[in-house]
Image (cartoon, grey):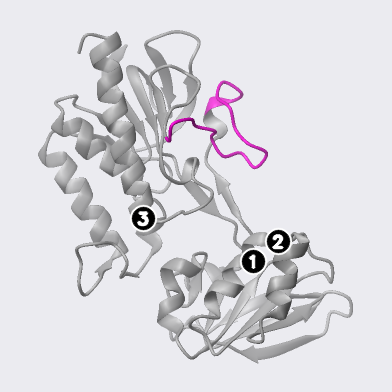
Amino acid sequence: MEARKVAIIGSGCAGLTAALYTARAGLQPLVIEGDESGGQLSLTTLVENFPGFVEGIQGPELIDNIRRQAERFGAEFRNGRVKRLWLERQPYRLELEEGELEASAVIIAAGARARWLGLESEQALIGHGVSSCATCDGFFFRGRDIIVVGGGDSAMEEAMFLTRFAQSVTLVHRRDQFRASLIMLQRAKENPKIRWITNAEIVEIRDVARQEVTSVVLQDTRSGKRREMPIAAVFLGIGHVPNTGFFGADLETDSDGYLVTRDYVFTRAPGVFACGDVQDRRYRQAITAAGSGCMAAIEAERYLQEHAGI
């Protein structure tokens, strides 16, 4: 069976940074790219809040730069995803879509995927007025009217944050009852910039042909009646799904499936580290993902030095 010192699961900002650091340490990491090579940044257009790029940088370009930097030091990449991570004994066994391999240390950087509405128009306009990250994209809609979809704490947080930039924020929820905590709901309702549309859902986002959001079609969940509403952007605040299904119950996760870590990146399995959005439900930024990827790589190097004599 193929044997590696370090296997990295995921190729977003966290995984690529971990690859860069472990490669520079001479560990010849293998990165299994996953279903979505490059992670969520590969779906992003202009990134203006990553340090070092005065005029900003396109998300796919940033990912490509970090990847080439890691390759320069010897990191290797493999297409596909991990079907199962076996942690019963060391070295750990990874079952891939094609073949298997063993690794003395594993860095899990599998990321999390945003929950979407499932509309064709929504998917076509991601990065062109449709976003799941207010912190990333809110700045681009200064003085505009925007929508936030959702009824939980995430939606309230997104809506309140976006009022810093938008002329108005309309919160759309398919029911008239909210999952948000009482204090978060109260804060949102006290914000004069936030408007409310309940018992409604978005059934179409326009205009795909122009590659920009110009309006949404709302449908009343009780009567089925539809109406069009002019809008400049749609932000999804219905949560994220961490990509943690490949290791079963071998590692600890919280109630929403995020990996539980201690001291930032340590899982309960020796030599298995987690970084980025797969364990970070709070910040979910490219720069924090990169930082945790650095931490995971340094700890993996230390672990191998202490336990594997590498």
The stretch in magenta equals: 247-264
- The residue most toward the right is 223
Q: Residue at x 49, y 40 (%)?
A: 279
Query: Which quarter of the figure has residue 57?
Result: bottom left
Q: Amino acid at mark 2?
A: Gly
Q: Residue at x 30, y 70 (%)?
A: 48
Q: Position of residue 117 (x, y in %)?
A: 64, 64
Q: Amino acid at mark 1?
A: Ala
Q: Is residue 63 shown to the viewer in this render?
A: yes
Eyeballing the image, is 206 above or below 36? below
Mark 3 nearby-residue class (10 Å; few <14, some 14–19, many ≥20):
many
Q: Residue at x 47, y 18 (%)?
A: 269
Q: Position of residue 13 (x, y in %)?
A: 33, 49
Q: Is residue 5 shown to the viewer in this render?
A: no
The C terminus lies in quadrant: top left
Q: Which mark is first along the chain, 3 or 2? A: 2
Q: Which mark is residue 286?
A: 3
Q: Residue at x 73, y 77 (%)?
A: 189
Question: Distance of mark 2 from mark 3, alpha carbons?
Answer: 24 Å
Mark 1 nearby-residue class (10 Å; few <14, some 14–19, many ≥20):
many
Q: State the SS at label 1.
A: helix
In the depicted view, which residue is nearer to us: 139 or 208? Answer: 139
Question: Distance of mark 1 from mark 3, alpha carbons?
Answer: 20 Å
Q: State the SS at label 2.
A: loop
Q: Are marks 1 and 2 in contact (CB under 8 Å)?
A: yes
Q: Label 2, on which residue?
A: 152
Query: Which quarter of the figure has residue 295?
Result: top left
Q: Are marks 2 and 3 in contact (CB under 8 Å)?
A: no
Q: Is residue 261 magenta?
A: yes
Q: Amino acid at mark 3?
A: Ala
Q: Label 1, on which residue?
A: 155
